[in-house]
Image (tube, rainbow, N blue to C red):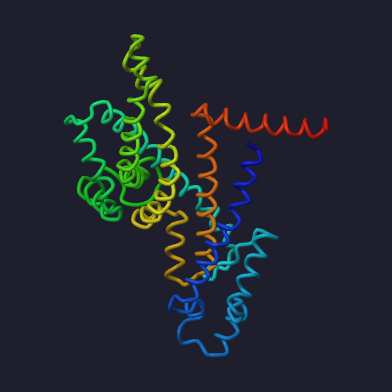
C-alpha cells in the first residue's frame, strides 16, 4: 500500500508539469501585455522596458519556465502577483479554504440526494418513481451552471429575499452557491448509483440473502449498496474536478473570495503568476483527491484488501526464498 501511494505521488509530478507547461503556452499566445496592467497603456517605452526587466518578461519563455519550476521545487515559490506585489502562494492560501468548503459541501449535498435517488430508482426500475428520478437527473446534467446560478440568485435573493445575493458572512451565504453546484452534480451521481445498483441486485449473493428470509432493506442497503458504491466513489473523484470548475462560476456570480474568483480577476488583469499558481493549486488538490478516492476503495471493497495482502505475501515469500538460497 505504501509503495502504491508513493508511486501515485511521483506520478503527480509530470501531471503538474504538464498543466504548468500548457498554462505557460496559453499565457504566451493570449493577446495583451501584463505590463499594461501595471504601468498603463500610455507609459513611456523606457518605463515599460524597465518594468519588463523587473517582472522577468524580457527573457525567453523556456528560460522563464525553467526558472519558475526551479523556484517551486526548491522554495515553494509561486512568484509574486503583478497587481498587489504580494506572494501568490500567500494570497492563494488565504482564499483556498473558501473554495474547499464550497466544493466539498456541494459534493456532500449531491451525495445525500443522489445516492437515495439512484437506490430507489434501481429498486423501483421502470416505475413512475424511476422515470421521475431519471428525468430530474437528466435535468441536473443538462442545465448550464451559470444560468442556474443566475436563476437561483434572481428567485431566492432578489424576488423572495430569503437569502443574501453575495458574500459568505453567515450560513445563509453558503446556501445558494452550495445548492447550485450540488444540484448540478446530482444527475451524474444518481445515474451512476442506479446503473451500479441494477448490476448488484442481480447477483447470486443478493438472491441468496433474500432466500434466507432477510429483510429487504437489509439486503439492499447492507449487502447491495456497499458493493454498488465502488463506481460511485470513482465518479465522486471526477465530480470533484467538475465541482472545482463550478466553484469558479459560483465564486464569480456570488462574489465569494475564493481561488476561482481570484483567478478570473487575475485573467482580466493579465496577472499570469496568479493564474498559474491558482491552476497548480487546483490541479494538486484534484490529484490528491483522486489518490484518496483510490485508497477508499480498499475500505469498501474487501477484495481489494485481499489483493494488496496477497501481493505482499508473494513478495515476502520470494524474498525469503532468495535469502534461503
Find residue 314 and report its horizontal and vertical position in percent: 67, 31
Left or right? Give the position of 180 relative to 99.
Answer: left
Q: Quadrant of the N terminus?
A: top right
Question: Which residue reaches farthest front?
Answer: 325
Q: Is residue 163 left or right of residue 233?
A: left
Q: Is residue 105 above or below residue 43?
A: above
Residue 305's place in the image compared with 259, above or below, is above
The residue positioned 65% from the left and 45% from the top of the image is: 6
What x and y, as percent, mark residue 197?
A: 34, 30
Looking at the picture, does residue 221 appear above or below residue 165? above
Residue at 53%, 56% (x, y): give it. Answer: 92
Q: Nearer the viewer, residue 182 or 208?
A: 208
Q: Residue drawn 55% across and 57% down?
A: 15
- Quadrant for residue 176, please give it: top left
Question: Residue 283 placed where, x, y %?
Answer: 51, 54
Location of the C terminus by quadrant is top right
Residue displayed at 26% across by 31% down? 121
Q: Residue furthest bottom?
A: 45
Residue 304 image offset from top left, x and y in percent: 54, 31
Amino acid at each position: 500500500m505504501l509503495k502504491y501511494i508513493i508511486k501515485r505521488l511521483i506520478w503527480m509530478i509530470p501531471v503538474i508539469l504538464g498543466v504548468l507547461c500548457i498554462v505557460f503556452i496559453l499565457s504566451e499566445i493570449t493577446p495583451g501585455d501584463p505590463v499594461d496592467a501595471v504601468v498603463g497603456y500610455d507609459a513611456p517605452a523606457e518605463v515599460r522596458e524597465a518594468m519588463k526587466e523587473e517582472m522577468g518578461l524580457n527573457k525567453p519563455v523556456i528560460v522563464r519556465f525553467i526558472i519558475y519550476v526551479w523556484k517551486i521545487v526548491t522554495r515553494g515559490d509561486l512568484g509574486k502577483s503583478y497587481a498587489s506585489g504580494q506572494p501568490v502562494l500567500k494570497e492563494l492560501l488565504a482564499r483556498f479554504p473558501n473554495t474547499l468548503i464550497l466544493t466539498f459541501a456541494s459534493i456532500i449535498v449531491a451525495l445525500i440526494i443522489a445516492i437515495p435517488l439512484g437506490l430507489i430508482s434501481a429498486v423501483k426500475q421502470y416505475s413512475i418513481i424511476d422515470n421521475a428520478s431519471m428525468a430530474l437527473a437528466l435535468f441536473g446534467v443538462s442545465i448550464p451552471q451559470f444560468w442556474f446560478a443566475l436563476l437561483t440568485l434572481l428567485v431566492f435573493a432578489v424576488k423572495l429575499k430569503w437569502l443574501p445575493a453575495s458574500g459568505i458572512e453567515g450560513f445563509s451565504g453558503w446556501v445558494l452557491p452550495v445548492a447550485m453546484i450540488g444540484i448540478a452534480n446530482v444527475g451524474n451521481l444518481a445515474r451512476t448509483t442506479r446503473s451500479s445498483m441494477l448490476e448488484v441486485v442481480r447477483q447470486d449473493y443478493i438472491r441468496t440473502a433474500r432466500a434466507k428470509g432477510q429483510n429487504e432493506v437489509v439486503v439492499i442497503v447492507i449487502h447491495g449498496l456497499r458493493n454498488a458504491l465502488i463506481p460511485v466513489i470513482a465518479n465522486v473523484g471526477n465530480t470533484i474536478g467538475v465541482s472545482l470548475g463550478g466553484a469558479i462560476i459560483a465564486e464569480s456570480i456570488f462574489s465569494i473570495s475564493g481561488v476561482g474568483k481570484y483567478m478570473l480577476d487575475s485573467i482580466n488583469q493579465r496577472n499570469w503568476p496568479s493564474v498559474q499558481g491558482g491552476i497548480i493549486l487546483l490541479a494538486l488538490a484534484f490529484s490528491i483527491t483522486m489518490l484518496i478516492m483510490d485508497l477508499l476503495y480498499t475500505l469498501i471493497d474487501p477484495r481489494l484488501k485481499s489483493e494488496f495482502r496477497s501481493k505482499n505475501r508473494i513478495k515476502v515469500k520470494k524474498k525469503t526464498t532468495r535469502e534461503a538460497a
